[in-house]
């Protein structure tokens, strides 16, 4: 499925815009994976899908409007029809009917402007046409939208507006059947403006049609959506510090031409993009404080990923006589007392992020009660109990102490990633159970348990059946300042007897089995050979190998130990390394847990039971707890109150 320009946001804006209206005749287009020109409603068969049903209700209302002169005389009737089309876009922003709905909205507003003579309706029509172009750049209806905008400019008689509309149309559709007509009409009306019109780009140029980014404290990820892969050149230069990237054989979409996108985090000032030459797009990242960067392509859909990482800073050490703290973990104050500690707010939220209310706090049974004496004389007040010395952290499994252990750091924010989703079902069991549904259910159970038992904030990369690109999952974790990243998946094998649990952390695959698992999990976003060097560099720059190895070992041991009472034959398949895209670029210890083999009939039968899934979630919780206990042995004894809210990153519905 091709990328979108934040369709959910566009849908919200459309609903908040001026009152809805109706469109000229438009019919059903096939879903987004295979766009087609609309055809008459009468030729369409009823669509059982909810988006199709909603769209056809709107077209029926439109037909009723066109058939009634009485209705056409009332603005409210037009607005009711437009509202129906808006609902299609708002409720199903990834539907193949959305571009048809937007074209209908634009046409209806344009007709209203002519009938009622209200300039605002012209503005609303142009907004709908431009939303279609921006949100659904691959739609074949985009040409109709821009041509309608050009016709509106021509009807206005404003020469500057006509020139701008013609330029926008010819930039986007230089080889369309109406390109010559646009140039000819512009020439007749404004001979002095003819030289300002752009010449069609050379054939074969790939269009760059979207730019997005996610910002975190220690890294920022910039993603460019490209029509197809092109050669890239990059270099970092100083005075001022910046990175330029040239995409050869590429052309910018008109909406991106000569744009600057302020970032304003601690790493990037802004991202600039422009047409450097006729066949070269240049992207410039203006740095603030960046140590290094990496670039690589991902596929399905094709996008260029640029990761920049911050210059590490030494920890700040307080000077002066201070009492010994109870703990040195980041999120918890060293002051003893029963008051719960609120999780720190995010500095810069990830894109497409919403918050949802979490369950009530953990029961007070997990917190010892404290006697309170009010207005008692000083001699009667109980003496404060002495603070116990904090437990020292354990050495990691390599026998050394990472910097995280030396500083006694803990984890206040944990990202739980449910693999696959939306149009990507993952593996499917012989009985029809889909990996995306299984792992989402288990992930939501893990979220609840971590919040209840550990009191840490949990960020879900997805909380519904939506598709989140692999690079976006890591970006969410980085931008939220997460301390741990746990990705949950289910395994598959050609051998139906293969069974057991295994856990992975990021590194190069050490055996053929790990290679096969990585190939399957990366299938939704497989890069090409030309990306190999950059991907190898990104993996080699992984600075969390030791802690990720220990985190993976803790999760694996906990899964085996805690699942044996419920599945005595569970096989311990061990800890492995593999180059999973979903882990590349993560700034925190990160692991991928394969909780079962869906291809095993008996495993699938157990996995359909809610009770068994709850045991799986509890085993993952124990793995997280064991790792935190080794990392900071005081923290897991202090985390007793669940946070009031759980932050959930919601992706685009791409089913």
Image (tube, rainbow, N blue to C red):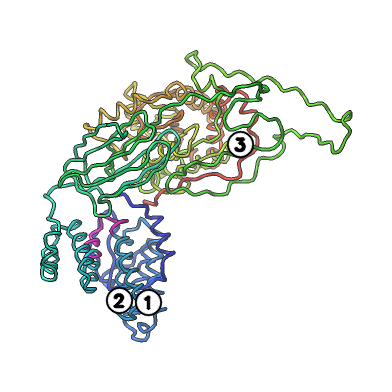
Q: Which residue appears farthest toward the front when viewing the image?
A: 239
Q: Which residue appears farthest toward the top when viewing the image?
A: 399
In the visual, does 410 lie left or right of 306?
A: right
Lower sequence index among marks 2 and 1 = 1
Distance of label 1 from label 3 (alpha carbons): 52 Å
Which residue carries the number 1 mark?
A: 78
Front residue of this view, candidates 1 and 226: 226
Q: Is residue 289 above or below residue 193?
A: above
Front residue of this view, candidates 273 and 487: 273
Q: Position of residue 10 (x, y in %)?
A: 38, 58
Distance of label 2 from label 3 (alpha carbons): 57 Å
Q: Is residue 81 above or below residue 281?
A: below
Helix, strand or loop status at disc 2: helix
> Do the numbered discs 1 and 3 sit on residues whose CB atoms are within 8 Å?
no
Residue 150's quadrant in the figure? bottom left
Residue 182's quadrant in the figure? bottom left
Is residue 547 rendered magenta in the image?
no
**Label 1: how many residues lie within 10 Å, few (<14), some (14-19) or many (20+)?**
many
Inspect this view and state whether residue 609 appears: no
Which residue carries the number 2 mark?
A: 111
The span picked out in magenta is: 133-145
Distance of label 2 from label 1 (alpha carbons): 10 Å
Lower sequence index among marks 2 and 3 = 2
> Do the numbered discs 2 and 1 sit on residues whose CB atoms are within 8 Å?
yes
Front: mark 2 or 1? 2
**Label 2: how many residues lie within 10 Å, few (<14), some (14-19) or many (20+)?**
many
Helix, strand or loop status at disc 1: helix
């Amino acid at each position: 499925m091709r990328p979108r320009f934040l369709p959910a946001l566009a849908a919200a804006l459309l609903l908040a815009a001026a009152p809805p209206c109706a469109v000229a005749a438009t019919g059903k287009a096939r879903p987004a994976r295979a766009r087609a020109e609309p055809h008459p409603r009468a030729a369409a068969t009823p669509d059982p899908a909810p988006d199709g049903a909603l769209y056809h209700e709107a077209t029926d209302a439109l037909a009723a409007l066109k058939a009634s002169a009485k209705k056409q005389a009332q603005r409210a009737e037009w607005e009711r029809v437009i509202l129906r089309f808006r609902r299609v876009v708002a409720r199903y922003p990834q539907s193949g009917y959305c571009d048809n709905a937007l074209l209908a909205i634009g046409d209806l507003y344009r007709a209203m402007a002519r009938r009622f003579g209200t300039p605002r309706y012209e503005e609303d029509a142009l907004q709908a046409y431009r939303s279609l172009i921006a949100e659904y750049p691959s739609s074949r209806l985009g040409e109709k939208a821009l041509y309608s905008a050009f016709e509106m400019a021509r009807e206005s008689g404003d020469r500057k507006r006509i020139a701008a509309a013609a330029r926008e149309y010819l930039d986007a559709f230089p080889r369309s059947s109406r390109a010559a007509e646009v140039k000819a009409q512009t020439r007749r009306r404004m001979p002095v403006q003819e030289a300002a019109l752009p010449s069609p780009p050379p054939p074969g140029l790939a269009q760059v049609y979207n730019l997005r980014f996610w910002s975190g404290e220690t890294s920022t990820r910039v993603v460019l959506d490209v029509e197809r892969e092109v050669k890239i050149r990059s270099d970092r230069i100083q005075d001022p510090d910046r990175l330029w990237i040239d995409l050869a054989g590429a052309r910018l979409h008109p909406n991106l031409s000569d744009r600057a996108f302020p970032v304003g985090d601690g790493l990037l000032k802004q991202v600039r993009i422009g047409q450097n030459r006729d066949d070269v797009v240049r992207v410039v990242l203006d740095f603030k404080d960046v140590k290094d960067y990496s670039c690589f392509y991902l596929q399905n859909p094709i996008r260029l990923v640029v990761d920049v990482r911050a210059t590490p800073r030494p920890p700040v050490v307080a000077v002066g006589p201070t009492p010994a703290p109870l703990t040195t973990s980041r999120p918890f104050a060293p002051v003893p007392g029963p008051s719960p500690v609120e999780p720190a707010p995010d500095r810069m939220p990830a894109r497409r992020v919403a918050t949802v209310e979490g369950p009530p706090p953990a029961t007070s049974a997990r917190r010892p009660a404290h006697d309170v004496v009010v207005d008692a004389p000083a001699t009667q007040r109980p003496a404060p109990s002495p603070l116990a010395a904090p437990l020292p952290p354990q050495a990691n499994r390599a026998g050394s102490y990472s910097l995280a252990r030396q500083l006694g750091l803990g984890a206040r924010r944990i990202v739980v990633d449910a693999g696959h989703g939306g149009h990507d079902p993952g593996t499917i069991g012989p009985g029809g159970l889909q990996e995306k549904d299984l792992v989402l259910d288990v992930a939501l159970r893990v979220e609840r348990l971590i919040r209840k038992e550990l009191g840490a904030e949990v960020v879900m990369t997805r909380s519904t059946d939506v598709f989140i690109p692999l690079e976006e999952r890591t970006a969410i974790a980085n931008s939220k300042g997460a301390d741990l990243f746990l990705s949950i998946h289910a395994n598959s094998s050609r051998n139906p007897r293969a069974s057991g649990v295994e856990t992975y952390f990021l590194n190069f695959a050490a055996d053929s089995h790990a290679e096969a698992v990585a190939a399957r999990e990366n299938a939704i976003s497989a890069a090409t050979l030309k990306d190999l060097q950059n991907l190898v560099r990104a993996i080699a720059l992984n600075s969390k190998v030791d802690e990720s190895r220990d985190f993976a070992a803790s999760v694996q041991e906990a899964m085996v130990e805690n699942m044996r009472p419920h599945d005595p034959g569970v096989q311990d398949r061990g800890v492995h390394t593999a180059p999973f895209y979903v882990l590349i670029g993560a700034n925190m210890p990160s692991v991928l847990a394969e909780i079962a083999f869906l291809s095993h009939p008996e495993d699938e039968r157990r996995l359909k039971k809610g009770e068994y899934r709850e045991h799986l979630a509890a085993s993952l919780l124990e793995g997280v707890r064991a790792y935190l206990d080794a990392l900071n042995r005081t923290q897991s004894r202090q985390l007793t109150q669940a946070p009031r809210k759980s932050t959930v990153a919601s992706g685009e519905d791409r089913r």
